[in-house]
Amino acid sequence: MDLLTDRQGSVARAGDGRAIVAGRRSVAGSVSQRACTFCGSRVVLYPIADALHLVHGPVGCAGYTWDIRGALSSGPQLHRLSFSTDMREQEVIRGGEKSLAHALRVLIGRHRPACAFVYATCIVGVIGDDVGAVCRTIEAETGIPVIPVASEGFKGTKKDGYAAACGALLDLMGRPGAGGPTIPKSVNIVGDFNVAGESWLIRSYLERMGIEVVACLTGDGRVDDIQRAPRAALNLVQCAGSMTRLAKAMRDRWNIPFEQVSFIGLEDTAAALYKAAELVGDADTLARTRELVRSEMAAVKPELARLRTDLEGRRAALYVGGAFKAFSLVRALRQLGMRTVMAGTQTGGGDDYEHLKSLVDPDTIIADDTNPLELAAFLQSERVDLFIGGVKERPIAYKLGIGFCDHNHERKIGLAGFAGMVSFAREVHATVTSPVWSLMPRQRVAP
Amino acid sequence: MLDQTPATITERSALKVNPAKTCQPVGAMYAALGVHGCLPHSHGSQGCCAYHRSHLTRHFKEPVMASTSSFTEGSSVFGGMANLQQAFQTMFALYDPEIVAVHTTCLSETIGDDIPTIIAKSRDEGKIPEGKVVVHANTPSYVGSHVTGFSSMVAGFVKYLAASTGTRSNAVNLVPGWVEPADMVELKRYTAAFALPTIMLPDTSSVLDAPATGTHAFYPKGGTTIAQIRAMGDARHTLALGAWASTAAAEQLRKQCQVPFEVLDLPIGLAATDRFVSALASLSGTAVPQAIEDERGRLVDVINDMHQYLAGKSVAIWGDQDQVIALTEFCRDMDMKPVHVMTGGHGQAFEERVKALLADSVPDANIRQQGDLMLMHQWIKNRPVDVMIGTTYGKFISRAEDTPLVRFGWPILDRVGHSYFASVGYTGGLRLATQLITAIQERQDRDAPDHALELVM
Ligand code: SF4
Ligand code: SF4
């Protein structure tokens, strides 16, 4: 297909020797699949269930992010409500600081949250409200941390939103009373958001190995736990794109080493657990880890083998948020006998794409920040059987008669860990072998 | 744990908890999708556009195409002219739309970008190819709601395109209001039944209910064509359904092309459909076709048959102004009691209209414009209802208060069917009535002690 000239640097094939120019903004006028800074911040902080999340801006930004993420909480559900300062023309003209202060007072008084996050949306950045000052005032009044999140959408991409969220988390951790002596044999899970209960699963593995999980950042998150996070002996960084920055800052500040891991797929999960055991555990931890990996693997392998017989040789395409998820998925798909023929991300960096190329088979298409036309063309030209993506991509795949698996925050089934690999395989199997494909015309480009 | 709403209602200003509306641009986007070969364009940061597309996709389970100006920090200071110009080049080069419908966002409105000037400049500089159409609407979300954006965008199409040639045609313009694709199909069936040549704007049928074909049509086959919109200027009459969603376009047609218009309620329910049908009859000068009379008869028949289940049942209704007004009248006519009636949108006229509708049957009803679902929940806590009609966002209230919810309106994120089965017209009324009756009967079954469980109802 013809690519827009501007897009040529953003698409390559593994083995063609061309580097991807990443981290750029979408070309103005393109039907971008990307979201904004605010979205990035919201995604990272949202799972903190005992915090108040107030969106300062017009009502829309808050409405669209109301309970759209399956980040589960075992306790409070405050994060599942939608709070907006509902900015009107008056505030746009005269400034919204007053109404922000009012909203915070009312909400903190009513819900008694452990802390409050105030998200600034685009318009707040333009009218120039001093959100920081309002937060300080309310913090002094109420005695809870009130933290501004500078997430104005135009300030950058989703990645910049992750950075703003990491800043907010660091702010929490740096409060008086937070931190303390290092807890032996302990870790933080960094960058898991407990979608469909995944943090619970990972936590249970670690606990069975004899490792204490001090905090999960931010899945099923609690403000207290986050404030204890500086006491962990190691940060296990799962969603590297969003959270490496935080891990680096924690290393610099509290000397906590970090390790990039992934809990997607059997190999990666086992590697992650061994790494944790090796870095903070002792001989006993290692023995327990071996036992855990052995028994979990044994439990899932027969089922995976059964599903694999139908999936062998099928072709997959993926378009996901971060690069690390793409790496894991390529490996997980290979475990199912499937070949990745296209891989793209919203937020990957140049080095990420080089690594991705080294993982996939030669000729695989690699794309940064793609758009629906490109996607549809790739899905057809590469004769794809399975597409892994998010909410905006699902109907495109279905229209083309291609199986789909949601690996984004709207999914309902946990895909992490050993058990998650089976769920993933079942989901992939169900969609790829769905009888519905035989009911619809499937117009593929001839090989 | 999900229920965190205090029962005591206190005055709140400048704070929405669980909003009952979305923002203008998403409405503009929905309207623009109802024009054939049209690419909606969001002039602002890319986040808004991504959210609007995702939300439409969640509701319709369909791909939604729209482009964005992808504002940067620089555009927020210097204005978005460069972005929009670049966007035109990109769009026409890559997606080849016949028409681009630009809507603004909070950001570009606040910065104060002058869209008509940018369009004119882009045309002069050849950034908009010859023969391609660009229209726009201003849609600041800090005013109004998604309905305002919808209404402004429809009026925008008229403003840019409708023209009178001096010869009146036999056609009638129909502005359908904010309804589902299936409703659009049904409305066309009605006008066809009266043999009225009709131009409907917008028309999202065969766009947001596209069949699975094995291909992805970037521009699906449905939608009002540019030629049709132009021809609206010559029509002899405009029927605008729903005052909030459709008056602006009808008014624009009158101003611009002297097409007389009348505004009717959305034809949801018996009485509102009667008024729609009699308008069609008088426009066509023909009697109501027997087939439609029969459909009316069936609806009345079912309401009669099931009266004992409906009578006196209290109902809470929220959603868009036009829809809520029609639903309130329908429920009242079925002998139900709409005790809480709310819109997230604006308009004193909404409160007055609903008050008038309920003056005799529920004089003490709670009625509110610009409400939110926290308020609705508080009302329900203080005066429980038998059934609720509203969007998916009522799901939390439904759980907390153990009250059935019949899903209606925008958005519905957790069920399907709304886009495929009409709610307008008599048959649509039949569907709504059966949904309500089923909800009530299922609740009765669930709550019945063994000895009182009825086999025949
Ligand atoms: S900034 Fe305005 S247009 Fe964008 S999502 Fe928020 S309310 Fe809607
Ligand atoms: S206004 Fe800004 S912050 Fe809000 S959704 Fe749009 S891009 Fe994101």
Image (cartoon, grey):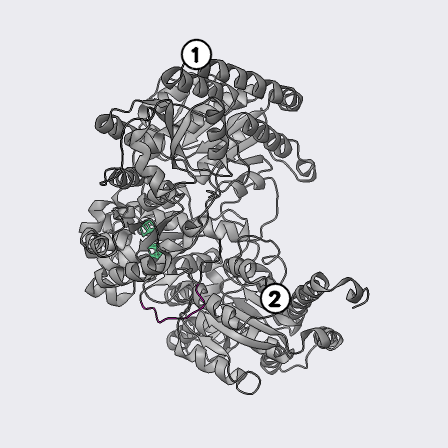
Q: Residue furthest top?
A: A283
Name the side, left or right, on which A119 lies relative to B265: left
In the depicted structure, whether residue A123 falls above or below residue A325: below
Residue at 61% of width from left, 71% of height from top?
Answer: B191
Mark 1 CB near ligand 2 (8 Å cut): no
Q: Nearer the viewer, residue A126 or B280?
A: A126
Q: Amino acid at mark 1?
A: Ala
Mark 2 residue crowding within 10 angstroms, few (<14) / some (14–19) / many (20+): many
Mark 1 residue crowding within 10 angstroms, few (<14) / some (14–19) / many (20+): few
Task: Tell me where residue B3 appears, x and y as whole percent.
Answer: 48, 58
Q: Which chain hosts label 1?
A: A
What span is in magenta? B6-13
Q: Nearer the viewer, residue A121 or B425?
A: A121
Does residue B101 appear anywhere in the picture? no
Q: Nearer the viewer, mark 2 or mark 1?
A: 1
Q: Amino acid at mark 2?
A: Ser
Q: Nearer the viewer, residue A191 or B5?
A: B5
Q: Provide the secondary structure element on which disc 1 rests.
A: helix
Name the side, left or right, on which A129 lies relative to B40: left
Where does label 2 land, which residue? B423
In the depicted structure, whether residue A310 falls above or below residue B319: above
- Distance of label 2 from label 1 (alpha carbons): 68 Å
Q: Quadrant of the C terminus of chain B?
A: bottom right
Q: Which chain hosts label 2?
A: B
Task: Tell me where residue B276 appears, x and y as whole percent.
Answer: 59, 77
Task: Tell me where residue A73 appears, x and y as whole percent.
Answer: 46, 44
Q: Residue furthest right?
A: B456
Q: Nearer the viewer, residue A298 or A158?
A: A298
Does residue B281 appear anywhere in the picture? yes
Question: Looking at the rendered structure, which numbered label has been put on residue A283?
Answer: 1
Residue at 46% of width from left, 30% of height from top?
Answer: A203
